[in-house]
Image (spheres, helix red, strand yellow):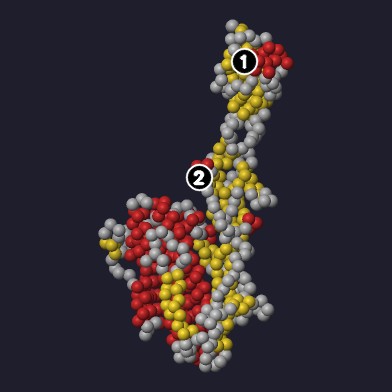
Amino acid sequence: MIGMMYLVLTALLALNVSKEILDAFITINKGLETTMVTFDGKLAGQYGAFNASFNENQEKYGAAWEQAQELRTQAKELIHHMDLIKAKTIAETEGLTMEEVIGKNEIGKDTILGLQYVNGKDNYLSNTNLMVGAEPDAPRDNDHEDGNNYRATVLKQKLVDYGSNLKAMAQGNATVQSAIDSLFTFPEKYKDASGTTTNWEALNFSDVPLAATTTLLSKLQADVRNAESDVLGYLFAGVEAASYKFTQLAPIVIPEKTYILEGDSFRAKVFLAAYDNTNLPGIDLGPEGLELDSGVVTLPEGQTSVVKVGADGFGRLAIPARGVGDKHWEGIIKFRNPATKAEEPYKFIVEYEVAKPSLVVSATKMNVLYRGIENPIEVSVPGIPQDALTATISTGSLSKKPDGSYVANVKTGSEAIINVSAEIQGQKKNMGQFKFRLKSVPDPVAKFAGKTAVDNTVKKSELTASLGVIADLKDFVFDLNYPIRSFDIAVTNGADVKILSSTSNRLTAQQKELLRETRRNQTISVENIKATAPDGTIRKLAGITLRIL
């Protein structure tokens, strides 16, 4: 179904339905990454159980355990190979280094810069050139200049080889082998949305936007983990079947995800789980953040909590969501071996993220910083506390206030970019960037006797009551002060013009006397008005000419 959704979205992209579809790819990719985290937790539990059983009885589990280690290595290498392709396509599209795109997360696993932080989500040139080349009908397969091979042809062969190896491990189970075939068998020819015959490489990676290719790679990674889990379960069950007996069956539903896009489908695994209601397991949960070493299945003494197990064999976790951020829990399920009567421990992992509800509304056309003044900036990332965030600016300065907000000061240039990073468990991660336009604060409007340049007349009483000139920056987002530093008063009397100057914002005694001597229908002008802007520059304001009523 994910593959079908990918094809539909790719066809819509060809019709230039770009923004909404790109957003859909971002959402789907996030869902696939969440599915991968779920698979990682499930596989950690499966491998932990296998290791524990092998340590207790190497003769019984030895052959299957060796196959499990081979399976683990193959899957890890293939996942890493696709991570490199993702990182390389993003790096070349964004003009970044590989180290800026791919790194380790807080628990040591590879992590790729999220699609939501990639500007060129709709760019298809870099990934097309990297994975297919200039001729879609003849995809390239040679190595890249850095020694790695990112070609789609090589990736397809790796997937085919992986499927073949897994089928060999699952000999005797037609259901598992059929599921593997459905994931890793690729016909020679496909038909694209227009009905044109093409190959797998061109269909998925030639002239396809970065958001789509990244999402497909995530889907393929989920397929790899899904098949790994199925085959690992088959290997383990093949050994365990001879020892364990169960008395009850229960239907189980495991959804791929608990949120669904409108138009998508709810997908889940539905199966029967077997348990022995006369031999219920014991479940212990370790402290938050505990990470047991590989093969260790013992929790710290005195730091565990017991999970109640019902008569149906299910333990039910209820962990209060305290504090935002990623959460990691590990625990042990202890089941008594019917044959040896010894408790056999199995490690399980619970991972999730706690975030505060957040709403962000931005008027994108108003993303402006003004030169020469203090611009307040709010920076936040859902799920990450303020004290873990660091913001920098590409020009000017950015200072952090005690309340977690920032003040930006810029003087020159046409744009500024604010980059945000977060420190998570001792590691700094890039959270993305935000671009602002830079503008100068507009000139204020000069006022004299309550009049501006658009007015034409003034009463004699208003004239004589005036104290001086003020600068009014009306309807501006900041409350700024423009002190008047000087102005001239010019009075016209026939052909005679008398001009007096002031070196402040107030009328001088001589100017006041000149205004008192004016008569009806005379013209006065306030000229050469100069004000000091917040950045210290001198602004010359429009003059005011008035006829006395």
- Residue 295, can we see it? no
Q: Residue furthest bottom?
A: 339
Q: Which mark is residue 459?
A: 1
- Residue 230 lies, in percent from the top left, at 43, 78
Q: Is residue 359 above or below residue 548?
A: below
Q: In this orientation, which residue lies closer to the viewer: 217 or 230?
A: 230
Q: In this orientation, which residue lies closer to the viewer: 406 or 456?
A: 456
- Residue 163 lies, in percent from the top left, at 38, 75
Direction from residue 341 to residue 93 in the image, left or right: left
Q: Residues within 10 Å of mark 1 (few under 14, many from 20)?
A: some
- Residue 14 lies, in percent from the top left, at 34, 53
Within the image, what quadrant is residue 188 found in? bottom left
Q: Quadrant of the N terminus?
A: bottom left
Q: Residue furthest front?
A: 311
Local SS, label 2 = helix
Q: Quadrant of the C terminus?
A: top right
Within the image, what quadrant is residue 529 found in? top right
Give the mark count: 2
Q: Is residue 325 above or below residue 484?
A: below
Q: Which residue sits at x=55%, y=67%?
A: 352
| Circle 1: residue type | Lys
Within the image, what quadrant is residue 295 found in? bottom right
Q: Which mark is residue 218?
A: none
- Residue 116, can we see it? yes
- Residue 498 lies, in percent from the top left, at 64, 11
Q: Which residue sits at x=36%, y=58%?
A: 10
Local SS, label 1 = loop
Whether residues under marks 2 and 1 lie with C-beta atoms below 8 angstroms apart, the answer is no
Q: Which mark is residue 364?
A: 2
Direction from residue 403 to residue 51 in the image, left or right: left
